[in-house]
Image (tube, rainbow, N blue to C red):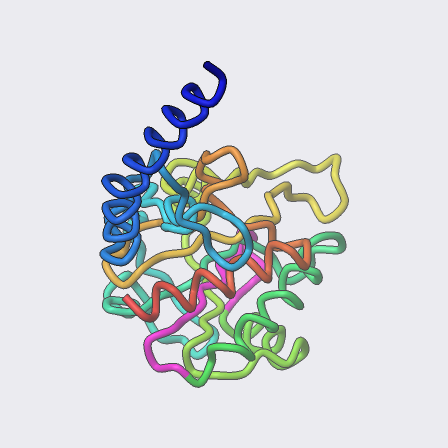
């Protein structure tokens, strides 16, 4: 009886192999394996879905004056990938770190005519075009595509707080007199705010301009957007 049982089992396995294995091989060759069968992986182990950049929304409209006394607006960046930061030249805390890291980004993409940077002052009363020009020279910011911008403080605050949801505010109790985040915003060629997803699949929305990891991430994603 046992021998018959073994023979029956062997026969079933043989039939399975003859019928199903060629089909499985064909599916693999044609890359027709569904997502439930396997996950598409990128080089860093993330799924392909997580490597796609999310569209957060439209970047707010603006028109400001740069360090060369030229009017700069959204139209200046039309068809370009650009990064936005809010800072002020006399900031004693996080701004020097942000500017240093933005300089790293500029050095990587500054030669690309389809890339730009908008560094927007939240203390325009002090940060005139002349002051911003001197500031740019002091930190070694080079390139015609890096604009240090100034203008009406109310409009700039609205742009940051309502347009980008990046907090800025005046506070006499803090060093420097102003509060603001240390994040960078990434804008695509169509004027959309874009970001990657975190490890849980949620949009990070903005990039940490104070950390090496944030700089690394935004550089990777600038490369992706420039290729679109």
What count of labels does the image hold? 0
Q: Residue at x 52, y 66 (%)?
A: 128
Q: Residue furthest top?
A: 1
Q: Nearer the viewer, residue 162 or 228?
A: 228
Q: Nearer the viewer, residue 38 or 13?
A: 13
Is residue 12 positioned above or below 111 on the image? above
Q: Nearer the viewer, residue 218 or 36?
A: 36
Is residue 127 positioned above or below 25 on the image? below
Is residue 217 positioned above or below 13 on the image? below
Q: Is residue 225 left or right of residue 23?
A: right
In which image quadrant can residue 90 be found? bottom right
Is residue 147 shown in magenta?
A: no
Q: Residue at x 76, y 45 (%)?
A: 175
Q: Residue at x 75, y 35 (%)?
A: 173
Q: Residue at x 56, y 63 (%)?
A: 127
Q: Position of residue 96 (x, y in %)?
A: 70, 62
Q: Position of residue 80 (x, y in %)?
A: 30, 69
Q: Position of residue 182 (x, y in %)?
A: 61, 49
Q: Position of residue 228 (x, y in %)?
A: 27, 66
Q: Is residue 170 left or right of residue 201?
A: right
Q: Nearer the viewer, residue 75 or 176?
A: 75
- Highlighted range, magenta: 112-128
Is residue 140 positioned above or below 219 on the image? below
């Amino acid at each position: 009886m046992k021998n018959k049982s073994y023979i029956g089992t062997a026969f079933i396995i043989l039939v399975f192999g003859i019928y199903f294995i060629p089909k499985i091989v064909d599916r693999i060759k044609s890359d027709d394996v569904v997502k439930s069968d396997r996950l598409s992986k990128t080089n860093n182990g993330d799924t392909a879905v997580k490597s796609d950049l999310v569209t957060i929304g439209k970047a707010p409209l603006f028109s400001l004056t740069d360090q060369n006394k030229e009017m700069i607006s959204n139209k200046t960046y039309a068809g370009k990938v650009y990064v936005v930061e809010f800072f002020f030249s006399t900031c004693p805390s996080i701004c020097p770190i942000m500017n240093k890291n933005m300089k790293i980004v500029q050095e990587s993409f500054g030669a690309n005519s389809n890339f730009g940077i908008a560094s927007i002052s939240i203390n325009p009363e002090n940060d005139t075009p002349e002051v911003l020009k001197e500031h740019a020279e002091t930190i070694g910011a080079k390139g015609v595509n890096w604009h240090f911008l100034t203008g009406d403080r109310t409009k700039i605050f609205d742009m940051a707080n309502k347009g980008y949801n990046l907090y800025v505010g005046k506070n006499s109790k803090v060093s420097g007199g102003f509060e603001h985040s240390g994040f960078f915003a990434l804008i695509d060629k169509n004027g959309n705010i874009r970001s990657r997803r975190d490890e849980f699949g949620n949009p990070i929305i903005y990039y940490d301009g104070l950390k090496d990891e944030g700089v690394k991430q935004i550089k990777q994603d600038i490369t992706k957007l420039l290729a679109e």
